Image (spheres, grey):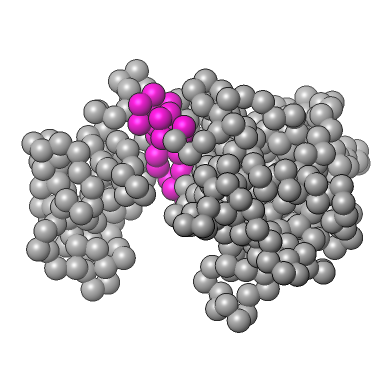
Amino acid sequence: MTSLPVLTNKEARALFLNRHGLTDAVSGQGKGRDLQGLVDQLGFVQIDSINTVARAHHMILHARQPAYRAKNIHLLHDRDRGVFEHWTHDASMISMAHFPHWKLKFRRHAARAAERGRDDTELAGKLDDVLAQITDRGPCCSADVGEGEARSSGGWWEWNPSKVALERLWRTGRLSVLRRDGFRKVYDLTENVIPAEVSGIDYSAAETIDWACRSAMDRLGFATSGELAAFWDLITPAEARDWCRAAHGRGEIVEANITQADGSLRKSYLWPDTLSEIAPVPTSRLRIMSPFDPALRDRKRAERLFGFSYRIEVFVPEAKRKYGYYVFPILEGDRLVGRVDMKADRDRDRLGVRALWPEAGVTFGKGRIVKLEAALARTARLAEVSNISFEDHWLQSH
C-alpha cells in the first residue's frame, strides 16, 4: 500500500495562515479596492455584537491591513455594494460575488420554515404586511414593524410576529440589509440592494455544492469533508462527503496526512498542486486577533494545528472564568503565543490591559514586549483611543 504524503506541522501552519492573509508583511490602505480584495480572499468576515475593544469584523480586517478603520467596511457595504450581509455559520459580511450561491440557503430556509407549520400559522398575513410596508414606505428596521403586537411566549427570541416576519423575509432572500444604524439592521427589498448583475444569476444546487467545496478548499489549504461543509455553512456534511468522494475518484483532489501540533497525523484532502506549494514563512509580526477570526473560529482545528485551546467565557460566571470575559488571541509569526484581556475605555481615552497570559513555553521578554506594545498601539488606533494603561501584575504566569 502506498503511504500518503505528509505535511509537517510547520508547513501546514504556513499554508493555512498564508491562505488567510496572515503571512506577508502588512500592506494596503484598508479601504476601497484593497479592502475588497481582502474580503474576497477571506470570503467573508464574521459580525459579532461584543464591542469591548472593536467589533469582530473590524479586528479581523485590521489584523491584516492596519490602515483599516471601522467606517471602511460599511462604505464597502452601504455605498459600493462590494459585500452583502447574511449568514455563514454566523452573521457575516460576504463578498457580493457570492450572492447567487446564497439562493440555495434562501430556498432551504424557506423549505424548513414551510415544514414547521406552526410558525406559518402564527405569521399568517405578516409576511405580506411587512413586504407591503417596505414597498410603500421604504426601508425599515425591527422597531418600525409590529407596533402594539403581543410578543411570542416561545417563538424566536420572544419577538412579535411582524419582527419574526421581517427576519424570515431576510433569511429567505426577499429582503436584504441596506445598512446598519449603529448595530441595528435596516432592511429593504432585495432588488433595491443587490446589484441586478449579481442577483440575476442563478445556479443549480449541484453548481453551488461544487463551488462551496472548491472555494472552501482554496481558503483552507487542506480539509476534511466536514471542514469543507462547515466553512460556508451553505451545504450539508453529506453533500461535502459525496463531493470529496467524486473529486478524489477523478483525481482532482488527493489525500495527505497533516501533522498536528501534538505530532499526530490527520488525514485531509487537498489539491495536488498544494503538495509542491512552498508557502512563505510568516513574518515575526505580532498581531492581536479577534476570537472570531477565520483562522481561529474553528476551535478544534486551531487546537489541533496550533496547540491553542480557546473558549469564549462571556456566559461563564465571573468567578469560574479561567481567563476573562472576552480575551484576544495573540499571533506571532506562525505561533499563538498568548491571550490578552483588554478593554477600550472611550470615556477615559485609553485602552486598558487587564491581563496577559503567555502560552506554555512562551516568555514575554524585552523584545516581545516591544512588539506587544506596537500591536497594542495599532489596536488603540482602531478603537479610537489615544493611551494604553496596564493594571498591576498584568503579565500572568502560565
Q: Considering only vertical position in the picture, is 378 above or below 349?
A: above
What is the quadrant of the N terminus in the image?
A: top right
Name the quadrant containing residue 146.
bottom left
Farthest residue to the bottom: give it: 319
Residue 250, given in percent of the width and then of the height, sits at: 69, 27
Residue beneath the point at 57% across and 54% down? 350
Name the quadrant containing residue 160.
bottom left
Q: Nearer the viewer, residue 286 or 266?
A: 286
Residue 118, given in percent of the width and then of the height, sits at: 22, 64
Q: Is residue 130 left or right of residue 334?
A: left
Q: Is residue 185 left or right of residue 48?
A: left
Q: Considering only vertical position in the picture, is 354 above or below 144?
A: below
Q: Is residue 239 left or right of residue 198?
A: right
Asked if the stretch drawn in magenta spans residue 4, the answer is no
Residue 15, given in percent of the width and then of the height, sits at: 77, 35
Residue beneath the point at 20% across and 38% down? 139
Asked if the stretch drawn in magenta spans residue 76, the answer is yes
Residue 69, given in percent of the width and then of the height, sits at: 52, 36
Q: Considering only vertical position in the picture, is 317 above or below 395?
A: below
Q: Nearer the viewer, residue 355 or 3?
A: 355
Residue beneath the point at 72% across and 43% down? 374
What is the quadrant of the C terminus in the image?
A: bottom right
Q: Nearer the viewer, residue 162 or 245?
A: 162
Q: Which residues are magenta?
A: 72-93
Q: Is residue 226 visible?
A: no
Farthest residue to the top: give it: 197
